Image (cartoon, grey):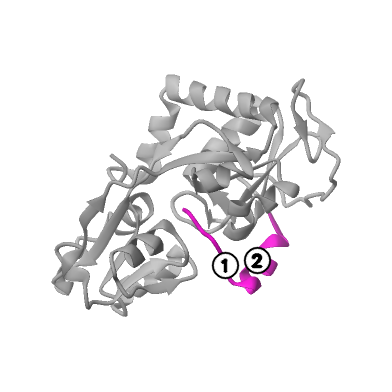
Amino acid sequence: MQLKSLATAKLAAKAAAILAVGSLTLTACGGSSTPAASPEGGVSLINAGKLTVCSDVPYEPFEFQKDGKIVGFDMDIAAEVAKDLKAELNVVDSSFEAIETGTALTQCDVSISSISITDTRKSVMDFSTPYLDDDLALVASDSSGIKSLDDANGKKVGVQQATTGADFANEKGLDAQQFEDTGLLVQALRAGTIDAALGNQSVLGFAIKDDPKYKSVEKFATGEQLGIAIKKGNTAMAEKINGTLQRLTDDGSLEKFKTTWFGEAVK
């Protein structure tokens, strides 16, 4: 997910929300600018004993609410990072604008929210090693008559506001309709108010995987990779997170998470 700007209302609404993950109770997130030492030597946390993670919820299947909990692919990874830090996991529901500009890292230890690694972002934040490759896809219904990107010209194509999908549509000369989040984009596709949706294959693939009326008609190799955002220069945190990602890769857990949340969508 790669956003440049979001509506001010969404930023204000989301910046205030603090949600707990799993069976954790709702807790307040401190805004202290002085990090507190964590149980793990060399790593400092904004709130002692808690790993505070900024995420843009909902963004299925990476992060979304289910039965009063925040779950998803990113949340499984976040829980493992917290476990390795011997810390409790708290999630701050933030706007993606705050996340992708690095502002979220003033109130969170890390940001985990399907963040595409880009040179622009690397100038204001550090990233973990990539944990998922995620190209773009064009998804359409059988009745739309769209079989490729060329067929989408003159059709109603939806994208998530200011994402790589939106940029790609613009580059290809499509007059795309923009939606604030992927949930609204998928709703429009199902309601028939748009003919096709263009976005990350992981999210759109997940949205249509159980509905035979829709299919991914074309994929585009953009080379996007997702990473965990870390405050610039926080090498101790980066080493811990990379250690967790390596462990999850080596013991097969990362692949298990992919199968759980994406099925065949990310291959």
Residue 210 percent location from the top left of the image: 27, 56
Left or right, 227 with reference to 209: right
Residue 261 percent location from the top left of the image: 40, 44
Q: Nearer the viewer, residue 33 or 257?
A: 33
Left or right, 161 with reference to 82: left
Real-space Cα distance between discs 2 and 1?
7 Å
Secondary structure beneath dot 1 equals loop
* The C terminus, quarter of image: top left
Q: Nearer the viewer, residue 83 or 167?
A: 167
Q: Residue at x 67, y 38 (%)?
A: 232
Relative to 119, residue 248 above or below: above
Q: Are marks 2 and 1 in contact (CB under 8 Å)?
A: yes
Residue 85 visible in the snapshot: no
Q: Which residue is mark 2?
A: 11
Q: Name the quadrant containing residue 159.
A: bottom left
**Mark 1 residue type:** Leu
Q: Nearer the viewer, residue 118 or 30?
A: 118
Q: Residue 12 in magenta? A: yes
Q: Which residues are magenta?
A: 1-18
Q: Residue at x 49, y 22 (%)?
A: 246
Residue 51 percent location from the top left of the image: 70, 38
Relative to 187, residue 211 above or below: above
Q: Name the quadrant containing residue 56.
A: bottom right
Secondary structure beneath dot 2 equals helix
**Mark 2 residue type:** Leu
Q: Which residue is mark 1?
A: 6
